Image (tube, helix red, strand yellow):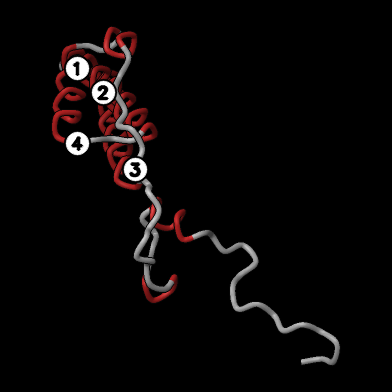
Amino acid sequence: MMAGRAPRPRTAWNALPLETHLRNGSYRADRHGPIPLSSPDLSEPPWEPDADDLQGLGPAGQRFLTRMLAENSVSYVSGMLLLQAARTLDDLAAWRLKSQTDPAAARLALACAKTFAELLAQMRRW
């Protein structure tokens, strides 16, 4: 330590607040310390789709969305991902019908299936 300088803080210059780690699911007790007894309220109102959101969905997407909302309470971000997953599921159903006769449609159905899986994986993070 040099004379006249204050000691360096033990935290990183870009350290995130504890609330952010709790909200993102990145909290680790060995890194971030114990959770205070009066932990902040991280709950937010559950997301519900608008009538416009539901109107643009096909039967497969509507079934998926209503089932997921019946089983889970989702945040706004998860709701947007869920809505996009429902739209992708509708596209997948349409491309699967056409894929029986068209090889290009089969490739698009595979792309929709991959996109659907990626959207579900994104939802696990939020």
Q: Earlier in the sequence, mark 4 or mark 3?
A: 3
Q: Earlier in the sequence, mark 2 or mark 4?
A: 4
> Label 1: which residue?
62
Q: Secondary structure at mark 2?
A: helix
CA–CA distance in space, label 4 to label 3? 14 Å
Q: Secondary structure at mark 1?
A: helix
Could you say where residue 107 lies in the image, as x and y percent from the top left? 29, 26
Could you say where residue 119 lies in the image, as x and y percent from the top left? 32, 36
Query: Amino acid under label 1?
Result: Gln
> Label 4: which residue?
72
Q: Earlier in the sequence, mark 1 or mark 2?
A: 1
Residue contact between numbered discs 2 and 4, judged by CB atoms under 8 Å: no
| Viewer-nearest residue: 33 or 93 | 33
| Viewer-nearest residue: 12 or 110 | 12
Mark 2 nearby-residue class (10 Å; few <14, some 14–19, many ≥20): many
In the displayed orientation, state which residue is furthest to the right: 4
Residue contact between numbered discs 1 and 2, judged by CB atoms under 8 Å: yes
Give me the residue at 61% from left, 70% from top.
Answer: 12
